[in-house]
Image (cartoon, helix red, strand yellow):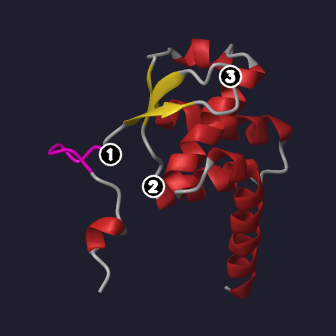
Amino acid sequence: MVDINDMIFTRSEDGVLIPQMVALENLPNKPEVKLRPLTRGKLQEIYAIAQSNDPVEKAKADTVIIKEGLIEPKMTDGQIDDMKPNWAGAISVAILSISLGIPQEEVGTKAQEVIANQEIELKKK
């Protein structure tokens, strides 16, 4: 029988998801940052933003991922908005990796599968 603890993210006593140190596999020297995984509900919210017809809204999806998942180094909203694309991409991939439980190199492929499955489910409703 499966243990429920294998199915859920661990939370601290105050109910916050416990962050973890993660190497950014897509950057040279694989620097480490402290990240918090995103829940299924938060991922669905971000997916909705990413599917917007408005390009400005679509661009916000990565920013929301970083604002929700990056714990250290601490950054202001302005600093996150000014982040270099290679860093923003690597951090987003790492957050999605720990949220989905898959290796960072598979995030792009798996994200497309998840999106396709979400669209199928939405069409059924």
Query: Helix, strand, or loop for circle 2?
Result: loop
Task: Give the label, 2 or 3, closer to the camera.
Answer: 3
Disc with the residue nearer the chain's start (2 vs 1): 1
Residue 14 lies in the magenta stretch: yes
Q: Quadrant of residue 44?
A: bottom right
- Secondary element under disc 1, as helix, strand or loop, is loop
Residue beneath disc 3? 87
Reading the image, the residue beneath label 2 is: 39
State the mark number for residue 17.
1
Q: Disc 3 marks which amino acid? A: Trp
Cβ atoms under marks 2 and 3 closer than 8 Å: no
Q: For the residue marked with disc 1, what is the amino acid?
A: Leu
Q: Mark 1 or mark 3: which comes first in sequence? A: 1
- Quarter in which the C terminus is drawn: bottom right
Return the disc, 2 or 3, that comes first in the chain's sequence.
2
- Looking at the image, how many numbered discs can be counted on the residues? 3
Q: Which residues are magenta?
A: 11-17
Depth-wise, is mark 1 or mark 3 nearer the camera?
Answer: 3
Q: Nearer the viewer, residue 41 or 90?
A: 90
Q: Is the Cβ of the residue at disc 2 closer than 8 Å to that at disc 1?
A: yes
Residue 91: percent from left, percent from top: 61, 31
Identity of the residue drawn at 29% across and 53% down? 10
Task: Classify mark 3: residues with Cα within 10 Å, few (<14), some (14-19) or many (20+).
Answer: some
Residue 64 seen by the camera: no
Task: Give the percent coordinates (x, y) of residue 19.
Answer: 36, 37
Q: Main secondary structure of the magenta part?
A: loop
Residue 62 percent location from the top left of the image: 67, 36
Q: Residue at x 64, y 33 (%)?
A: 25
